[in-house]
Image (tube, rainbow, N blue to C red):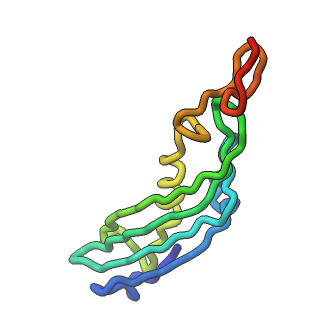
Amino acid sequence: MKVAVEKISSEPLRLEQEIAPGLWDVDSYDIVFADPIHIAADFLMKPGQIQVEARITTQRLITCSRCLEKTKQGIDYKFIKTYNLDSLGEYLDIDQDLREEILINFPMKVLCKPDCKGLCPDCGVNLNIKKCNC
């Protein structure tokens, strides 16, 4: 999302954009983005700086670390950052910062649900679906 600095004023400037996940290379082995990344951002000029408040929403398909089932998971991040006017040129491009926000918020351990029981270590049955006979 790129905006001309001259268009930003003391009144919030709202911009919305959809980004294909492939353009930002945010997929991983166990997380694949199922929908475009929706960004709604407000740009506000303050003395010597620009404040950006953005909301990032999308759906991702995850492979659970315990049971190996695939499940859809919604994400909704709030992003707030201030940019110093002295460090900006004609344009403010927040794409890299938004991409980093998504990557930083990847879970360390991907789970389909917090109480996932996983697989039986002996027979491999999914313990969320049925009990094993081990």
Res 10 quadrant in image: bottom left
Residue drawn 57% across the image and 69% down it: 38
Q: Is residue 38 left or right of residue 124?
A: left
Vertically, is 128 above or below 4?
above
Residue 97 is situated, as x and y percent measured from the top left of the image, at 47, 60
The quarter of the rendered structure image containing the C terminus is top right
Residue 122 is situated, as x and y percent measured from the top left of the image, at 74, 13
Residue drawn 44% across the image and 74% down it: 41
Q: Which of 44 and 92 is in front in this view?
A: 44
Res 35 quadrant in image: bottom right
Q: In this view, does 49 lie to the left or right of 118?
A: left
Residue 116 is situated, as x and y percent measured from the top left of the image, at 59, 33
Vertically, is 53 above or below 117?
below
Q: Which of 2 and 76 is in front in this view?
A: 76
* Residue at far right of view: 123
Q: Nearer the viewer, residue 61 or 124?
A: 124
Res 111 quadrant in image: top right
Residue drawn 76% across the image and 15% down it: 133
Residue drawn 37% across the image and 69% down it: 53
Q: How many marks?
A: 0
